[in-house]
Amino acid sequence: MAERVRVDLPVKELPKEWYNVLADLPFPLDPPLDPKTQQPVDPEALLAIFPRSLVEQEVSDQRYIPIPEPVLEEYALFRPTPLIRATKLEEYLETPARIYYKYEGVSPTGSHKTNTSIAQAYFNAKEGVEELVTETGAGQWGSALSYAGKKFGVRVRVFMVRISYHQKPMRKYLMNFYDASVEPSPSKLTEAGKAFLVQNEEHPGSLGIAISEAIEYVVNSTKAKYSLGSVLNHVLMHQTVIGQEVEKQLKLINEEPTIMIGCHGGGSNFGGFILPFVPKKLEGKNIRFIAAEPTSCPSLTKGEYRYDFGDTAGLTPLLKMYTLGKDFVPPPIHAGGLRYHGSAPIIARLVHEGIIEAQSFEQEETFQAARLFAMLEGIIPAPESSHAIAAAVSEARKAKEEKREEVIVFNLSGHGLFDLSAYV
Ligand SMILES: Cc1ncc(COP(=O)(O)O)c(C=O)c1O
């Protein structure tokens, strides 16, 4: 059997900057458009819902943005996260591929989401924001923001997709533990929510609807700002601490990745993981990036590449992305964080340019991969992350059939200890 390898970096190796891929892309991104005028949105207009520092990051083309000291201090509680070689999985699959995973489940709330929630709570607190309002699917993002809000003294209100609110009560308790208010969405707190409840009193909800509710709430408040856990440029940028660490970790063991995989909901863990490697690919390095998504919410594999609203009620600017249409309500699969109709504009453009591949997986296949991984490697993955595992298993099997040596690295975005009811 291959030797078990676990690469840990000391705290002093924590990345000190976030990486902004826009500085290195050979094309500009299509800008967000104002739905009324169809003209690029004036960044000043975004100040109605976001603090200035985050708006500046959203439109920045600076390659590196320094991470403020208080954010680094919070990161140091759980970062750098480990990179582990999945030797038992390799052995079981009898694959010539070497498989590594970056484990983001060691964060205080169990996923990569704290990488941006801490940053967002910090910048909002610094600008005097008293309340942060957001949406959450499975509850990972909501709990990450609740945790970060508590750290920096900002109240948090979460609109949680109704189906997940019922499927995952432990996540709600976790948010309440950090004193956040949690509403099942659609809710009666907003006009958008009420309109969906009229259609169906037990509406399962979707991320698109929950985003509409959070934005409507913020627009009608003077003290609150909105916080998004995925999709936007600044969110993906905060997540690049993941990929930057992976780069250092692989270097320490003299490995070069040939396949990098992450699950894709709105694109933040996948983006944070692969974007620091995009310049290498642009220089001609042999490296495949695979975004894994559910067949039941196949935005990258079946969606159209066009401008669409980021939410269901049509309150956001128009974003150029792969979309299933803002009205698409995905079936209630357990990977609640992957039930989003759209995608990050950065990831969408890279898919469109052929720099990133997308693959989709049935829920049952991801559950089988998750069980296999838990039995062999010991970690119970989040249902979202299980999509990355299913893709890694599939690529390792292909490598075996074709007798190819590969270095497969995937991002294990979170643990599934609060998702056990999905697996049993
Ligand atoms: C553990 C985990 N992985 C992945 C995702 C998908 O989001 P993103 O594509 O932004 O990483 C979520 C979203 O809630 C999640 O909780």
Image (cartoon, rainbow, N blue to C red):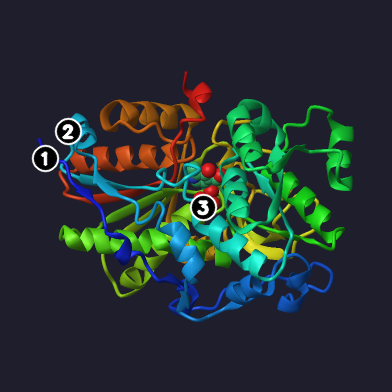
Q: Depth check: give the residue in front, 104 or 293.
A: 104
Tell whether circle 2 marks a residue whose Cβ is less than 8 angstroms from ligand 1: no
Q: How much space separates mark 2 and mark 3, taking CA atoms?
A: 33 Å
Which residue is found at the position 80% from the left and 51% from the top?
313
CB within 8 Å, label 2 to label 1 = yes
Badge 1 residue CB within 8 Å of ligand 1: no
Within-10-Å neighbours for mark 2: few <14, some 14–19, many 20+: some
Residue 333's place in the image compared with 37, above or below, is above
305 w.r.t. 24: above or below: above
- Does residue 339 appear in this view? yes
Residue holding disc 2: 91
Can residue 345 be seen from the camera position used here? no
Q: Secondary structure at mark 1?
A: loop
The residue furthest top is 424
> How far apart, in angstroms, are the residues tagged by discs 3 and 1?
33 Å
Where disc 2 sits, the SS reads helix
- Which of disc 1 and disc 2 is earlier in sequence? 1
Residue 353: x and y in percent read 47, 66
Pointer 3 residue? 114
Q: Secondary structure at mark 3?
A: helix
Q: Amino acid at mark 2?
A: Glu
Question: Which is closer to the viewer, label 3 or label 1?
Answer: 3
The residue identified by callout 1 is 2
Residue 216, how many percent across, how many down?
82, 54
Residue 173 location (% of width, % of height): 63, 32
Disc 3 marks a residue whose amino acid type is Thr
Instruction: Identify which residue, 354 or 123, lies in the foreground.
Output: 123
